[in-house]
Amino acid sequence: MENPLPRRAAANPTQYNIDAIAKLEYEALNRRTPTERVSDAIAKLVGNIGFLLAHLILILGWSLVNLHVIPGVKAFDPFPFGILALGVSSESVFLTIFVRSHLDLQVGMLSEQELTTILQMLQKLCQHMGVNVDSSKQEVQSFSKTTDVSKLASELEDKLPEE
């Protein structure tokens, strides 16, 4: 039976996958619609510490004003801050859409670790049962090596375009 993956992939499947994902990402970035570009810009904007600090300051200020802590400033959203709750809840619904893809990547990395463990267990079972797997031995050995997820993510990040 012929090896379905190129020789380079069998020798180093992790590097092959990083290169393939980076290539796909470049192609996907070039095909983005204006809506997707806006979505990416929003995700980049809200995914930083400045955005978090701005929220903390806004909520603290809102609370101070509406709890009558600042003299001479009239409360506009008295406790329990219904308008603030509506705004924050609505924002969280929209932001969830933008962080979804990052969560998918994390789940994928965990799945990679689980599949590697399963492959290692199957390899040991085959050896124990005397099943000959010589035809795919190199590929199986390459894929059954534990993937360093941090290294994989770092290499992938280095190869992906900035945008």
Image (tube, rainbow, N blue to C red):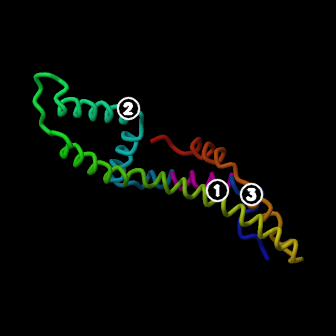
Q: Is residue 118 above or below residue 161?
A: below
Residue at mark 2 to residue at mark 3: CA–CA distance? 43 Å
- Name the residue nearer the viewer: 92 or 16: 92
Tell me what residue is drawn at x 80 percent, y 61 percent.
141
Q: Is residue 158 above or below residue 102?
A: above
**Image coords of residue 157 (percent x, y):** 57, 43
SS of the residue at dot 1? helix
The quarter of the displayed image where residue 113 is located: bottom right
Classed neighbour count for the residue bearing mark 2: other residues with Cα under 10 Å, few (<14), some (14–19), many (≥20): few
Q: Is residue 86 above or below residue 45?
A: below
**Does the magenta stretch mainly form a helix, a strand or a loop?**
helix
Lateral position of residue 46 relative to residue 117, left or right: left
Lateral position of residue 135 relative to residue 86, left or right: right
Classed neighbour count for the residue bearing mark 1: other residues with Cα under 10 Å, few (<14), some (14–19), many (≥20): some
Question: How many numbered discs sit on the rendered protein?
Answer: 3
**Image coords of residue 122 (percent x, y):** 77, 70
The quarter of the displayed image where residue 62 is located: top left
Question: Which residues make up the magenta segment?
Answer: 15-25
Give the residue pinned by disc 2: 50
Give the residue pinned by disc 1: 17
Q: Earlier in the sequence, mark 1 or mark 2?
A: 1
- Name the residue nearer the viewer: 136 or 60: 60
Tell me what residue is drawn at x 36 percent, y 43 percent.
41
Residue at mark 1 to residue at mark 3: CA–CA distance? 11 Å
